[in-house]
Amino acid sequence: MALDLEKKKGIVAELSNVAHRALAAVVAQYRGLTVSEMLELRKMARDSRVVVKVCRNTLARRAFKKTPYACLDRKLVGPIVLFFSQEKPRDAARLIEEFVKERGEHLREHLKVQACALGGRLLPVDLGFLAGMPSHKEALSQLASVLLAPMAKFVRAFRAPVFQIVRTTIAIRNQEKTKSRENENSAQSLT
């Protein structure tokens, strides 16, 4: 079906707008997916706040020209579907992984990932890497724990001798109390 120029401009503008707001993008060929599988994929995408777009490659190239995803233009070959993560960079990759896991591994043949991009950089085509990325809060907490670990270790090492002296003093006091009780008990038993 031929599109007139105004419709094409609208598609390019919409796709460009989505790409500007996206944190990550995944390009996949969808050759062999049934209509029901594609509908299920779109439903899962809505639930996980991932934007899914199918459009002509030339229109996608034009839409990506002034966006961080211009690096994807050489990967736009064949019938493609575009996934854009809007909230967390890992959402699009996780969506594809979950879809394949739920519907069957045979779908890996029909939904082949061509490229992944994050913040304007082309990533290796490894969904596990992108899907396993921590969220912003998780990354900050991991960074904080890495930065605090040496300090906590130093504090424990510094406090250890003091606690050892206190524990030793308490043990000696308890031992002396036990001896004095034993001496009192033995003195009472002699009388």
Image (spheres, rainbow, N blue to C red):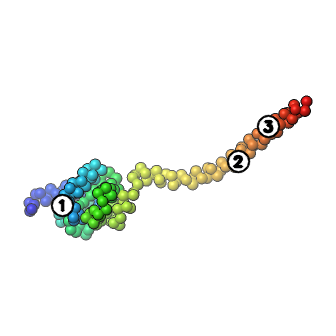
Q: Quadrant of residue 124?
A: bottom left
Task: Give above or below for 75 relative to 171.
Answer: below
Q: Position of residue 115 (x, y in %)?
A: 30, 65
Label 2: few (<14), some (14–19) or many (≥20) C-alpha neighbours in 10 Å: few
Which residue is tagged 1? Answer: 55
Amino acid residing under circle 2: Gln
Q: Residue at x 84, y 33 (%)?
A: 185
Q: Residue at x 27, y 52 (%)?
A: 44
Amino acid residing under circle 3: Lys
Which numbered disc flags the more N-terminal residue, 2 or 3?
Answer: 2
Amino acid residing under circle 1: Cys
Q: Quadrant of residue 37?
A: bottom left
Badge 2 element: helix
Badge 1 element: loop
Q: Are marks 2 and 3 in contact (CB under 8 Å)?
A: no
Badge 3 element: helix
Residue 28 showing in the rendered view: no
Quadrant where the image shows the N terminus: bottom left
Which residue is tagged 2? Answer: 164
- Residue that extends furthest to the front in the rendered view of this protein: 189
Q: Residue at x 22, y 69 (%)?
A: 77
Q: Which mark is residue 177?
A: 3
Q: In front here: 7 or 32?
A: 32
Q: How far is disc 2 from disc 1 in space, using C-alphas?
A: 70 Å
Q: Position of residue 95 (x, y in %)?
A: 31, 55
Label 1: few (<14), some (14–19) or many (≥20) C-alpha neighbours in 10 Å: some
Q: Quadrant of residue 74?
A: bottom left
Quadrant where the image shows the C terminus: top right
Q: How far is disc 2 from disc 3 in space, using C-alphas?
A: 20 Å
Q: Which mark is residue 100?
A: none
Q: Residue at x 81, y 35 (%)?
A: 181
